[in-house]
C-alpha cells in the first residue's frame, strides 16, 4: 500500500530477504496518472534510496488499451447486466477525476480514460449516447475533468432517463469511491431526480477476468526474467 500497511518499503525489503534480486512493480491503475501510478514509483524509489544493495526494478506500464483488459471489462459488464431485472437506457463509464490543470501539464490520464471508454463502447456495439464517459470524486475549488459523474446522473434523471447503470473501469477493485460514492450517493441522486432503476456494476476485483488481466500484465513484463 502506498499510504497503509503492508507498506511498499516493507514488501521490497521482505522480497530481498527471500533472495529476490529482480522485482517487478505493478501499479494497479489501468490508466496512468501522476497522482496514482507515479506515486507508486515514488514510494518504491524512496525505499530503494535507503538500501545499500538495491534489487533490479522494473515498472509495468499502464494498460488502458490492452486487449485482454478491454475484453475482461466488457465480459464482466455483459455478465453483470444480464443479472439485472432491467435494461439500462444509458451506461456510464465513470473514472476517478483529476484537476483539469493536470491535463494541461501533460498528464496522459484523460486521454487514456477516453481510449478505454472508446474501446469498450466499440466492443459492446453501443453509441456515444448509450455509453458515456464521466469523471467522479472531485473536491476543492479547482476545475476537474468533465463531464462530472454526479451532474450527469442528475441531468439524465431530469431528462427522463429511468434506468441507469454505472461501471468504473479505472478501478481494479471496489472501494469507497465505488461503493459509497457511486452505489450510494449517485444512486440517491438518480432516484431523487426521477430515476427508477439504478445499478452500480462491480469492479473486476478478484474475478476470473480481473485476475487474468493482472496475470497477463505480470507475465508480459517478466519476459526475459522468467
Image (cartoon, rainbow, N blue to C red):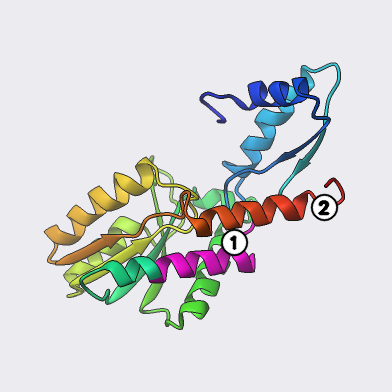
Establish if 50 lies above or below 19: above
- For residue 224, which numbered disc appears in the image? none
Residue ID at (38%, 40%): 140
Magenta stretch bounds: 63-78
Q: Quadrant of the N terminus?
A: top right
- Measured from the top left, where is residue 163 in percent x and y? 22, 71
- Measured from the top left, where is residue 198 in percent x and y? 22, 63
Number of labels in the image equals 2
Establish if 9 lies above or below 105: above
The residue carrying pointer 1 sits among few (fewer than 14), some (14 to 19) or many (20 or more) residues within 10 Å by Cα, namely: many
Q: List the residue tagged with mark 2.
A: 223
- Looking at the rendered image, the disc whose residue lies closer to the viewer, 2 or 1, is 2
- Measured from the top left, where is residue 51 in percent x and y? 80, 18
Nearest the camera: 33 or 87? 87
Q: List the residue tagged with mark 1.
A: 112
**Residue 86 figure quarter:** bottom left
Residue ID at (82%, 52%): 223
> Is residue 67 shown in magenta?
yes
Is residue 62 in view from this perspective? no
Q: Main secondary structure of the magenta part?
A: helix
Which is more N-terminal, label 1 or label 2? Answer: 1
How much space separates mark 2 and mark 1, taking CA atoms? 24 Å
Nearest the camera: 164 or 124? 124
Residue ID at (57%, 30%): 2
Amino acid at each position: 500500500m502506498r499510504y497503509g500497511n503492508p507498506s511498499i518499503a516493507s514488501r521490497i525489503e521482505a522480497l530481498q530477504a527471500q533472495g529476490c534480486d529482480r522485482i517487478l512493480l505493478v501499479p494497479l491503475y489501468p490508466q496512468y496518472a501522476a497522482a496514482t501510478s507515479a506515486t507508486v514509483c515514488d514510494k518504491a524509489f524512496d525505499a530503494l534510496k535507503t538500501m545499500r544493495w538495491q534489487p533490479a526494478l522494473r515498472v509495468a506500464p499502464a494498460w488502458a488499451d490492452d486487449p485482454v483488459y478491454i475484453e475482461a471489462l466488457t465480459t464482466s459488464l455483459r455478465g453483470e447486466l444480464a443479472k439485472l431485472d432491467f435494461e439500462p437506457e444509458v451506461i456510464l463509464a465513470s473514472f476517478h477525476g483529476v484537476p483539469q490543470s493536470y491535463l494541461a501539464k501533460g498528464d496522459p490520464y484523460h486521454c487514456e480514460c477516453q481510449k478505454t471508454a472508446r474501446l469498450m463502447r466499440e466492443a459492446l456495439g453501443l453509441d456515444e449516447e448509450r455509453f458515456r464517459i464521466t469523471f467522479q470524486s472531485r473536491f476543492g475549488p479547482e476545475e476537474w475533468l468533465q463531464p462530472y459523474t454526479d451532474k450527469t446522473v442528475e441531468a439524465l434523471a431530469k431528462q427522463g432517463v429511468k434506468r441507469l447503470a454505472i461501471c468504473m473501469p479505472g478501478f481494479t477493485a471496489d472501494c469507497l469511491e465505488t461503493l459509497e460514492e457511486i452505489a450510494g450517493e449517485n444512486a440517491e441522486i438518480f432516484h431523487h431526480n426521477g430515476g427508477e432503476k439504478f445499478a452500480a456494476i462491480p469492479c473486476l476485483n478478484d474475478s476470473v477476468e480481473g485476475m487474468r488481466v493482472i496475470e497477463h500484465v505480470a507475465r508480459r513484463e517478466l519476459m526475459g526474467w522468467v
